[in-house]
Image: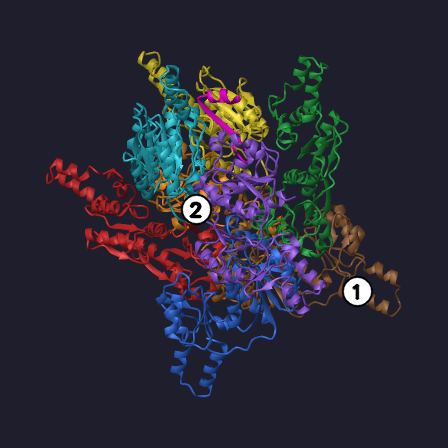
Chain colours: A yellow, B orange, C cyan, D red, E brown, F green, G blue, H purple
Amino acid sequence: MSPEHLKTVLKEVQEGKLDLEKAFQKIKDLPYKDLDFAKLDTHREIRIGYPEVIYCAGKTIEQIEKIFDYLLDGGSNILATRASEEVFQAVQKLESKAVYHKLAQAITVKKKEIPLSSTYIAVVTGGTSDQKVADEAAVTAEIFGSRVENFLDVGVAGIHRLFDSLEKIRSAKVIIAVAGMEGALPGILGGMVGKPIIAVPTSVGYGANFGGLSALLTMLNSCAPGISVVNIDNGFGAGYLANQINQL
Amino acid sequence: MSPEHLKTVLKEVQEGKLDLEKAFQKIKDLPYKDLDFAKLDTHREIRIGYPEVIYCAGKTIEQIEKIFDYLLDGGSNILATRASEEVFQAVQKLESKAVYHKLAQAITVKKKEIPLSSTYIAVVTGGTSDQKVADEAAVTAEIFGSRVENFLDVGVAGIHRLFDSLEKIRSAKVIIAVAGMEGALPGILGGMVGKPIIAVPTSVGYGANFGGLSALLTMLNSCAPGISVVNIDNGFGAGYLANQINQL
Amino acid sequence: MSPEHLKTVLKEVQEGKLDLEKAFQKIKDLPYKDLDFAKLDTHREIRIGYPEVIYCAGKTIEQIEKIFDYLLDGGSNILATRASEEVFQAVQKLESKAVYHKLAQAITVKKKEIPLSSTYIAVVTGGTSDQKVADEAAVTAEIFGSRVENFLDVGVAGIHRLFDSLEKIRSAKVIIAVAGMEGALPGILGGMVGKPIIAVPTSVGYGANFGGLSALLTMLNSCAPGISVVNIDNGFGAGYLANQINQL
Amino acid sequence: MSPEHLKTVLKEVQEGKLDLEKAFQKIKDLPYKDLDFAKLDTHREIRIGYPEVIYCAGKTIEQIEKIFDYLLDGGSNILATRASEEVFQAVQKLESKAVYHKLAQAITVKKKEIPLSSTYIAVVTGGTSDQKVADEAAVTAEIFGSRVENFLDVGVAGIHRLFDSLEKIRSAKVIIAVAGMEGALPGILGGMVGKPIIAVPTSVGYGANFGGLSALLTMLNSCAPGISVVNIDNGFGAGYLANQINQL
Amino acid sequence: MSPEHLKTVLKEVQEGKLDLEKAFQKIKDLPYKDLDFAKLDTHREIRIGYPEVIYCAGKTIEQIEKIFDYLLDGGSNILATRASEEVFQAVQKLESKAVYHKLAQAITVKKKEIPLSSTYIAVVTGGTSDQKVADEAAVTAEIFGSRVENFLDVGVAGIHRLFDSLEKIRSAKVIIAVAGMEGALPGILGGMVGKPIIAVPTSVGYGANFGGLSALLTMLNSCAPGISVVNIDNGFGAGYLANQINQL
Amino acid sequence: MSPEHLKTVLKEVQEGKLDLEKAFQKIKDLPYKDLDFAKLDTHREIRIGYPEVIYCAGKTIEQIEKIFDYLLDGGSNILATRASEEVFQAVQKLESKAVYHKLAQAITVKKKEIPLSSTYIAVVTGGTSDQKVADEAAVTAEIFGSRVENFLDVGVAGIHRLFDSLEKIRSAKVIIAVAGMEGALPGILGGMVGKPIIAVPTSVGYGANFGGLSALLTMLNSCAPGISVVNIDNGFGAGYLANQINQL
Amino acid sequence: MSPEHLKTVLKEVQEGKLDLEKAFQKIKDLPYKDLDFAKLDTHREIRIGYPEVIYCAGKTIEQIEKIFDYLLDGGSNILATRASEEVFQAVQKLESKAVYHKLAQAITVKKKEIPLSSTYIAVVTGGTSDQKVADEAAVTAEIFGSRVENFLDVGVAGIHRLFDSLEKIRSAKVIIAVAGMEGALPGILGGMVGKPIIAVPTSVGYGANFGGLSALLTMLNSCAPGISVVNIDNGFGAGYLANQINQL
Amino acid sequence: MSPEHLKTVLKEVQEGKLDLEKAFQKIKDLPYKDLDFAKLDTHREIRIGYPEVIYCAGKTIEQIEKIFDYLLDGGSNILATRASEEVFQAVQKLESKAVYHKLAQAITVKKKEIPLSSTYIAVVTGGTSDQKVADEAAVTAEIFGSRVENFLDVGVAGIHRLFDSLEKIRSAKVIIAVAGMEGALPGILGGMVGKPIIAVPTSVGYGANFGGLSALLTMLNSCAPGISVVNIDNGFGAGYLANQINQL
C-alpha cells in the first residue's frame, strides 16, 4: 500500500465518504498480508518508500499467482524478478497488461504512471554476455521511476570503446557497472569518473572464474575509490540501489 | 525394536506364554539386522531412545523396499527422509498407511500413536523458499511426538512480521530457525528470545551464497548466544534435536 | 591540483599577472607528478573531483615524506590512511597542522576549510570493536566535506538499541553500516530504512569468521535491497563513496 | 538489571519507600546504558533471562574497565570472556572478588549465589589441547547456575577411554563435545547417547586442519542425529546454550 | 606386456622357434603402443609389475574400443574403470568374456587366472551409499590377485555393528575404509586396529559436505596414526594400493 | 580491419581511385562497429596485430550470426571459439568455406592464406582427455600463422613416453603443456627444456580436483622456472600467446 | 604396556613369584592411566602393537613432564613429536638418555633395543626445505624398528638426480615421498616404481601454495596409482604407516 | 657448469694440455654435486641453458654458504633469491663482489660479463607497493642478459599515467605486468599492446584480497588474450621467463 493510497482512505473516512467497516477492510492488511505460505510486506512502501518485489526463484507458480492476485488489488507498480516464461504465462492470465522482459527474466505491471527522472543512471557492461544482468538492473530502475542509459560491451579488452562514451557516462548521476570474467570495468571507471559506481559481478566466464568469484573479488579490491559491490548476478539489487541514489 | 516391545517378549517368556525358540526368533536381530547391503541398527531405540531413520538418497528403490519390509514388522513408527515420489509409490505398495509429505520429501508410517507433547517447538522461516526444509524439520519432530507451531516468512527484510509472532515464539520450549541467503534470522531471534535456538541454513540464494555457505557462516558467527547450527538444508537433524530438547 | 587552483593560474596568465614560464612551472605536473618511485595523480581532482589519497601501507616512511612534501605545496586537503604513529611523527615534522586520528589510523591536513554539508551521513556500527573501521569512514567523509552522525554499538544482539536511533538514521542522506562477526546489521537496516546503505564488513571475530569472510558474504547476500558492499575493513572506501552520494 | 531487581524497585515505590526521582535514577538505564563507545544491553536479563556478557577481544582495557564499573553496580553475576591476564589485573582493582579462570581466559564475579542445578552438563573433550575451550564452556555454564561434569581426553584414538565414562555421560541432561583435528567425537557420542549434543570444533591441529575447518565440517556432516554445532573455539556459546537446555 | 610374456618370446628366439622378424613384431611396442590419440604404456607391467588400466571417463567409445582391441592381443588381465553400460556393450562385442561390475562401473577381462592371495584385504564401508566406491576397490584388488572380505554399513552412527566384525578386520593384512558424510570411520578403525588403513572419502552427503571435502579433511586430520588417504571416490586407487601392500 | 586493408584504402584515395564518400564508408567503422548488442573491436588488428576473436559462449545464435555477417565483409581470418555444432550450422549458411573443428569446438574461416611459420609450437598433453583443450590451442595458433607439432598422451604416469619426444619438443620455439588431474607435466618439462612453457590446466579429473583447481595450483607452484599459466581449459589463450611468442 | 611386559607379570603370578596385590598395582592402569588432564592409552600397545606417542603441540611443559614421568616407568620405547628445545630440556632432566632430533623436532627414549628390519623404507624428498618433515618420518620409523634410507633433494626440477637413485628406491619395501610447492614427486615415482608410496605434502612454498594445499591436491589427484596421502607436514604419520607396512 | 666451460675442458684434454685425472676432477660433478643435504643441479646450464638459482627461503645460512662455496668455483653468474640481509652478510664474506639488491631481496655475483640484449623487457607496476616484486623480476632478467625498462606506478586508478608510457611499452619484446589488489593492469595492457604479457599478482592488499588470490584470479580470467600468469609474488619466475622470450 502506497502512502498516497493510505492517505486517500483516511481522508475519505474523515470526509464521511467511507464508513468505518469498509475502511477497516481496506487497511487491515497494512502491516502485512498473511497468505499462509507467505507474509506480504504491505507496509514496506510506507516504511521504506518502495513496494515489496516478488523474487520468483524457489516459489511455485501457484504461490506466485496468489501473491500477484493480492498485489494486483493494490495501487502500486509491481516487479517480479527471476521469472521464467512459464511464470509469465500464468501471470498474464491474471493481468493482461503484465509485460515480460525476456533477457532480464522480469515481469512488470504498471498500475500507475511514474514520470521518469530527468537525471539518469548509466548502465555499463563489459561484454555481450553481461547484458542479461544489466537488463535486470535497468528494468528495476525504470519501474521505480529512473531514466536509464545503456552503454553495452565497452569492456577493457578494447577500452577505446569506453572512452567514446565517457562524457555521457560522466553526466549520469550514478553508474551501474556490470562485468564478468576478470571484472575490471568498475575499477577502470572509478579511475575516470567521479560519480558513485555500483559494481555487479556476473557469473560469465569459466575455469578459475568459479561462478563469478573472480569478478567479485576484483571489484571488492578495486584500488579506485567510489565503488561498492552487490551480489554476483544481482542486477535487481544494483537497479534498486541506483534508483534510490538517483532519486536523492 | 522399542524397549516396550522387548520387555513384552521377555515377559511372555517369563510367564511361559512364549517358548524359547520363538522368543529367540523375535529377538535374534536385536543388535542389528543384516540385510547384506545394510546393517539395520535395530538396537538403536533401546540404546538411544529413537528408532533408526531411513535416509533414502543414494539408496536404490529395491534397497529401500527391503529396509521398509523389515521395519514394518516392528512396532516402531517409521520415518524416511529425502524420499522421491517414486520411492513413496514403492513404499505405498508395502504399506497403505504410509503418508507422503511432499514438500518435506519425507515418508512416515505410524505403527503406534504417540501423544503430542504439551510444550511445543517453534519452527520459524525467513522466506517462502525455506519452507521445504522447515517441513522436513516439522515432520521429523512430530513423528517423534513433539507438537510444532509454524511461523513462516518472517525474515529480516520485514522484521515487523516477526515481532507480531514474538510472544508465541517465546513461549516455545525450543526454536528451529530456518533461513537462506544471508541467514540472519537466528541471530535476530537470539537477541530477543531466551530459548535454545537450532539454526538451519538453507541453500536458497544465488551468487556469493555458494550453496548455503553464506547462511551457514552467518549462523556460526552469530553474536547473540544460545544458537547452534546443523548442516545446510538439514531439516531432519534440526527436527530430531529439537524433539530431544522438547522431550527433556 | 584543484579546479579552482588551475582556473586561478590561468586567469592570472590572462590578466598578465603571471608570466608564461612561471605559469608553466605551476601547471607542468598537471597530469601527474613523477616522483621516480611513484606517479602522483595530480590530475585526479580535476578529472574526478577529489584529490589523490595516500595509502600508507606498504610504503616506506621516506616515500610517504616525499609524497607529502609535494602535496603540501598544493591547495587541496590531504588524507593519508593506514598510517602508523611512526608515520605521523614524520609527517608532523613537515607540517605542524597535520592531525592524527588514532583509532582510524589516518592523517589529515586541512589546507582549505570546506563547509560541512547540511545533510549528513549516518555511520552505524554493530559493536565496539568495529569502531576503528567506522572512524576511518567518518574521517574520510569529513575531510571531503560531509557531516557525519555516529550511531555506535547498536548491533542485532540487542536490537532495541537500534530502534531508539532509527528516526535519526532514517533522516540521513546515506548510511554506512559497519559490522563484523555475522554482519547482519546492514540487512536489518535495509528492511527498515529507505536510504542507500553502504555495508562495511570488518574482520572482527574468530573461528569460522575467516578474517571477515563471514560478514562479507552475509552482506552480499542480504535479502533486503538498497545495500552494496565494500572490501573488508575498508572504512576509507565507504566514507569516500558516502560523501560522493551525500554531495549529489 | 535482573527481573527481581526491577520488581524490588517497583515494590519500594508502591510501598512509598522510594521516592520517584530516586526510582527514576535506578531504572532510567533500563533499555541500555549508553557509555558513549558502547551501549550496554541492561534490558537483556529481563528480555532473555541472562545478563549481557563482556567479550573482551578487540576492546581496550579502558573500555573494559568502564563496562565493569557500570555492571558492578548492578545485582547480576558478571562474566567476561577472552580476557587476558592484563585485563584481569585491571578488573581486580575494581573488584577484589573477581576470579580469573586462566585456561578459559575468563573472569567471573559472583554478585549473588546461584544454586547449582541438580541435573548436570557433561563436558567431553577429545584431547588435552581441547581443554582450554572446554573450560570456557564450563565456566560459562556454572556462572549461570548449571552443574558441570568433565570427561577429558576421551577421543577416538583410544575409544575405550570413552566407553568407561559412557554411563555417566548418558546421565547428563545435555552434552558438550569438544574436539579438534578430525572432530569425530560428537558423532561417536551421537551414535551411543540419546541426549542433545552441542559440538564445539577447536582450532587444534595443523596442515589440512585449516584453523578448525576440518573439525567444523566433520561435525556439521555427522551421520548421527542429535548434534548441533557452534563456532570454532566457541566454548562460551556452547556453555551458554547447554545451560539454557539444562535449565529447561 | 607381462614379464613372463616377454621372457617366452626371448626364449623362443633363443631356441630358434621364432625368427627375428616375427620376434621384432611381437616386442616392437615394448616401450609403448602409439595409437595416435594415445600412447599405451605397454612397458608398465615390466617396470612396475602391473599392466596399464583404462580410465574410461573423458574418452570416446571409439577410443576405448581401439585400446581394448590392442590390449586384448596381449596376455595380461584387463581392467577398465568408470565405464558406463554403453561402454561395456561396445567392449562385449570385442570380447565376450568381458565382465561388467555394475555398481563399481568397471569392466574386467581375465586373460590368465591369478590365484587369489591367502591373506586378504578388508573393505569396510560406513553406509550403504558408499558401496559403489567400495566395489570399485574390491574389483581392482581382485583382478590383481588379492582376496577381499567386505564389511559393509558399519559406520559410526551404530558403532556396535563394527565391533562385531572387529576380529575379522584385524586379521586382514591391509584395510580399505570407505566413508562419506563426516568420514570418521577410518579414524575409529585406526584407534582399534594395528594394520595399514587406506581411507577413501566419498562424495556421499549434502550441504557442508562440499562434494566429499568434509570426509577428505576428516581423514587427513585423523588423530589415530596408520591412515593414509586417496582422492574422493577413488576406489580404484585404494584397491590398487591395497593389493600392492597385500602382495608384499 | 587489417593494416594492409587500411593502407590499400588510403592509397586508393591518394591515387584518386576511390572517392571520399566511398572511402569514408569503408573506414567509418574503424574504431569499432556498433551492433547495438555488441561493439566489435575493428581497430584491434591495427592496434595489436590480431583481429577480434568471437567467444560464442553466452551469446545467442542470432547475435553470433550478426557478428559473422559483419566480419565476413572484412579481409581478416576469422576464429570463433566455444562454438556448438548448432552454431556452426548457422555460420555455414552464411559462409560455406567455414570449417568446424569438432574436438576444439572452434570455427575458422580463412579469408586470406597465411604462410605457416618455419619455427613451430609444441603442443604436449598429459592424457587423452586433455586433447580437446590442446586442439583449441592448436587451431588458434594455426589460424594466426604458426606451425604446430602435437605430442599427445605423454603424461607423468609413463614418463618414458615423454623422453622419446624430448628432442623434438626441445626444438620448438615455445611449448604449450596441457594437463589435468595433478597437472605435473609442465613442471617436468620445465626441468628438462629451456624454452618458454605455457601451462594449461584442464578440468579433467574428479573429487579433490575441484574442476581443475588442483592442476592450476600445481602449475602456479612449479619449482622449475620458465613456466606461466593460463586459465583452466583456456586452450585459446595458450594458442594465442604461443603464436605471439613464436612470431617474435 | 607392551604385550611381553604383561605376559611376564601374568607368568610371575602363575609361578607364585608375584603376589596378587602387587600384580594388581602393576596392571591396574592397563586400559589407560588417568592423569587428570589426560588419559594415557596404556592399552594401545596390546591392542594395536604400538605404544602411544606424545604429540607435544598444545600441551604445557608441566603436562608433558607428567606424561613422560609415567611412561618412563614402562618398558616401551618413547617418541614425542613437535617438541621444542625447551620441552627437550625439561625431558632431559627426567631421563638423561633422551635424544633430541633437532630438525625433526622429536624426542626419543630407547627403553629396549629393537633390531632394525632387513628391508628398508626409502625416504625421498623434493628439496632441501622438505628435510625437516622427512626427518620426522625417519625418526618415527626407526624408533619402531624400521631401517630407513634417505634420498634427499631429488625433485622434478632436475629429475636426473632422481634417476640415479632409482634402483635403490625400487628395492625399498615402501616409499615415503616428501614434497612441497607443486608436490609432483610422488606422482613421478608412482609412474616408475611398483612399491606402495606414502606421499607427504609440505607447507614449503609461497603465494598460491596456500600453506601446502597445492602439494596436497597434486598428490591426491595423481594419475599414477599406488599413492596415498597423509596430512600436510605430517612426517610422523608417514613414518608410522611406512613402518607398519615395512613390518608386514 | 656452462657449455663453454665444459668445451674448454674437453679441448684441453684433446690438445694434451690437461691430463685425464685432472679433467675427471673438473667434470665429475657434471650431473649434479651432492652436498649431502642438497644435490646441486650442475648439469642444468648444459641441459636448459641457465644455471641453477638458489632459493634461500627455508634453507639455513650454513646450507646457503656451502652452496655458494661450490658455485663460486664455477664460471657461471650466480643468483640467489629471497635472501635476507643476514644471508647476504654471510655470502659477502665468501665473495666480496657479491651485490645485494635490497628491495628485491636478491644476491647476484657476476662471474662473467653478459652483454645486455638490444631488445628490452618492459616491467610495469600498478602501484608503489608492487615494486619489490618488480625488482626481483628485473634483477633476474638482467643477470641472465636482458635489458629491462621500468614503468612504475601506472595502475588503473589513474590510467592516463599508463597512456604516456604506452609507446615505449609497446616497443618492448615482452612485458612483465606486476599488480596487487584488483590486479587489473595486465588485462588493460593486453587490450592495448600486441606483445606477450607475463602477469605477476602480488599479495599487496587486505581483506578480500586473501593474500593475492584476488589479483591472481583477475589475471587468470582476463578477457584480453596474450596474457599468462605466474605465482603470487613470483618476480623471479616472471623475470626468468621474460628473459627466455626476450632471448629468442
Is A181 inside the magenta-drawn segment?
yes
Q: What's the chain of the residue with tag 2?
A: C
Q: Quadrant of the N terminus of chain D?
A: top left
Secondary element at tag 2: helix
Where is residue E24 shown, x and y percent of the image? 84, 60
| Distance from Cα at disc 1 to Cα at disc 2 | 58 Å
Mark 2 belongs to which amino acid? Phe
Query: Looking at this view, is F38 or H94 the one in front?
Result: H94
As helix, strand or loop, the secondary structure at mark 1 comes to helix
- Badge 1 amino acid: His
Question: Which residue is nearer to you in this view: A14 or A127?
Answer: A127
Q: Nearer the viewer, residue D14 or G27?
A: G27
Q: Residue furthest bottom?
A: G16
| Residue C207 horizontal/vertical position (percent) | 41, 49
The residue singled out by tag 1 in the image is E5
Q: Residue at x 49, y 18 (%)?
A: A110
D72 horizontally vs G143: left or right? left
Query: x and y percent of residue E204 in the render?
Result: 56, 50
- Residue receiving disc 2: C210
Q: Is residue F20 above or below residue B23?
A: above
Q: How busy is the neighbourhood of tag 1: few (under 14 within 10 Å), some, or many (20 plus)?
A: some
Is any part of residue E64 visible from this angle?
A: yes
Label 2 near label 1: C-beta < 8 Å?
no
Asked where in the image residue D203 lies, by quadrant, the reply is bottom left
Can residue D191 be seen here?
Answer: no
- Residue D159 image label: none
Q: Give above or below for A172 relative to D207.
A: above
Magenta-highlighted residues: A165-184
